[in-house]
Image (cartoon, grey):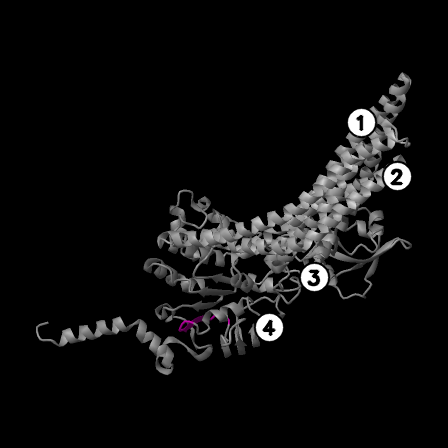
Amino acid sequence: MAVSMAARDLGAELDREDLRLKPGQVPSPAALAEWVGLSGLWCRAVRLSWRELLKLKGMGAVVLLMRDGSASVMARPDAVRNVVWLKDPAVAVEQDGVPVDELRLSQLWAGEVLMLRPDQQSRTDNEAWGIGWVARVVATERGVIRDITIGSIVMAFLSVVPPLLTMLVIDKVVAYKALSTLLMASMVLLLAVVYETMLGYVRRQLTAIIALRLDLKINLFVFRRLLGLPIDYFERTPTGHIGYLIQQTQKVRSFVTGKMMTTIFDMINLIVVLPVLFWMSVPLAWMVLALGGVMALIIAVFIGPIRRVYAHYLSTEVRKNTILVETLHGIRTIKSLALEPAQRDAWDRRAAESAYWRRKLDDISNWPETLVTPMDTLMTRGVLMIGAYMSVTGGSASVGSIVAFMMVANRVSGPLMSMARLMQDLEEVRSGIAMAGMVLNNRPETVNPSVGLRPRFEGALSFRDVKFTYPGSKNRALDGVSFDVPAGTILGLVGRSGSGKSTITRLLQGINREYEGQIKIDGVDMREINLSHLRRSFGVVLQENFLFRGTVRENLLAGRQGLTLTDAVRAARLAGAEEFIERMPMGYETIVEEGSPNLSGGQRQRLAIARALIHDPRLLILDEATSALDPESEALVNANISRIAANRTMVIVSHRLSSLVDSDQILVMDRGKVMDIGPHTQLLETCTVYRQLWQQQNRHMESFRSSKKSTALVPGA
């Protein structure tokens, strides 16, 4: 209760079911910290002394874990009075709590503390993906960037030492044969090399650290944002399209952790080196700057055309990748229907389009590179020619200063070239961010996943004048649907295709929430219920169910915390899957291959039912779950329905009316409206739609009975 109260004060709701404790078990500090972390808060379990506890003012919420398993929330520390104010959630006290001194607290508290505060990473997770988000993430590493910058400044100064020593050696040592000066220059050069080597190593290490951190943050953000998108977005958008757009984040990671850092170093190098160039020779320094400006201008002129061609190229790559992913997903259908030529033709067309625009992109990108190359050459060789001319015509430039200037100028031309190309790199990154944003900036299912009610469900369902239309459709999928189902009911949903049966199950799962009317579970409006809690309270089995690559046990447990092999065996027995699992080579440790080709359709479906039952849900949805089963498997599942339905509400969608005759209630749908609801025998008498469906599916049985009667009336038969 204390941890829940502290989290609630920070704007998060904790679900007791996530803790997964056995009756009477006291959670460990690490388990509590992990539990709090699921709500999106930052939480750490630490051990503190009394003095350290008094210093925790303004550190978020602090929960003291007592020796007897209880806990209290620290309202505030009072170092002046040498007490802490504690609030016990089980006792009604004043808002500030009660003061407790060190002696009294030491009798109950051993120093274990939970520290909670809003997670900065969670806050950035709720922000829109874009250049601003990337900049804010980079800013979180300002400490490491500061250290790298300091090291780069020192290295930039050290990089000037060799050219200056070269000038000294040529102008002084060689001209005047000064060995002592040569010795001193050699020692300075050696010392500079040692320091530059050490600083280079440290800078590379720090760069690797910041690259790793930024890469990890971007990866975590992208995957969390993907998981937060609504299911209907993935249903509307091709997988290959989504996959390629998400791949564009790699360009962002590559730029942020590579080219951006290199550019920072180059800018530092320019800031340090340019004054040295002007000190050596003002005319030559202006020449270098002028050439660098011309290079930047050339790149800027081509940015617009490159942007337009690059957009076409990315568009063709998206379409090509969509073909590839669809082919991989549907390879079994393609092979079985001999569709290889059609897929090959489609791929050839997409690949040709992509190659055409890639060629256009290469051509237009080649022009600025070609025009910039002479400028780069003039920066080095032109300096030599003009410097020699100045020396011959009586200028102040000496041979040593010319050589030294060339060496320093070489350290300028590279950064100027990279900074000129940076505009083109930025354009690619801008396009990558925009394309990834087409996926990542879609509206999530819920803005704050931690908010909402978390009631304990019994399973009573109520629909009141529910109307729903799918996006892009003109006709309502549900048109004024109203019905009530008490807890513990087996409800069958029947109707012709497109009548709205599966839409009802989608609304119950919170997949689509833009409906009119009211849907209540145990009297609580669904819109007020925490979405994750709602779905954890449901078990869902679809007609086609995905099994992960891994063992049977891992598929049944599906990563749920606190569940063991015993739970997997219980669920498998209830779903009728135990008998074939035990016949497998390694039982529950048998590997389910990708796509589960080593399992029959009936085995896959029974595993899916067992997986839905693993956490003992109060509500279970079977959406055409037995339509793909063979008769033996279907009979086995139907025989277990009564056991599966014990102490839970079941919603069964099925085209086979014979599998629903034992349901407590059958809801008949037609064109989004409720035609009738009642048990099988009643519907045969009162509902025309149900009677027609029953007669269509059982016409052969009626014919069989009629033929038997006719045969019995024939004499001698």
Name the residue that disc number 3 marks. 12
Element at badge 2? Answer: helix
For the residues labelled 2 and 4, say whether their Cβ atoms are less than 8 Å apart: no
Tell me the quarter of the picture where residue 11 sits: bottom right
Q: What kind of residue is marked 2?
A: Val
Q: Earlier in the sequence, mark 4 or mark 3?
A: 3
Spatial separation of the CA atoms under disc 1 and disc 3:
54 Å
Q: What kind of residue is marked 4?
A: Val
Left or right of residue 316: residue 423 = right
Q: Dot 4, how many residues are within 10 Å of its Cα: few (below 14), some (14-19), or many (20+)?
A: some
In the image, farthest residue toward the left: 716
Name the residue that disc number 2 marks. 282
Q: 343 or 95, which lies in front?
A: 343
Query: In front of the other: label 1 or label 2?
Result: 2
Q: Dot 1, how many residues are within 10 Å of its Cα: few (below 14), some (14-19), or many (20+)?
A: few
Q: Dot 2, how many residues are within 10 Å of its Cα: few (below 14), some (14-19), or many (20+)?
A: few
The x and y percentages for residue 517 are 57, 78
Name the residue that disc number 1 marks. 194
Q: Earlier in the sequence, mark 1 or mark 2?
A: 1
Q: 297 or 480, which lies in front?
A: 297
The verdict on residue 492 being magenta is: yes
Spatial separation of the CA atoms under disc 2 and disc 3:
64 Å
Q: Earlier in the sequence, mark 2 or mark 3?
A: 3
The x and y percentages for residue 577 are 41, 54
For the residues labelled 4 and 3, say whether their Cβ atoms are less than 8 Å apart: no
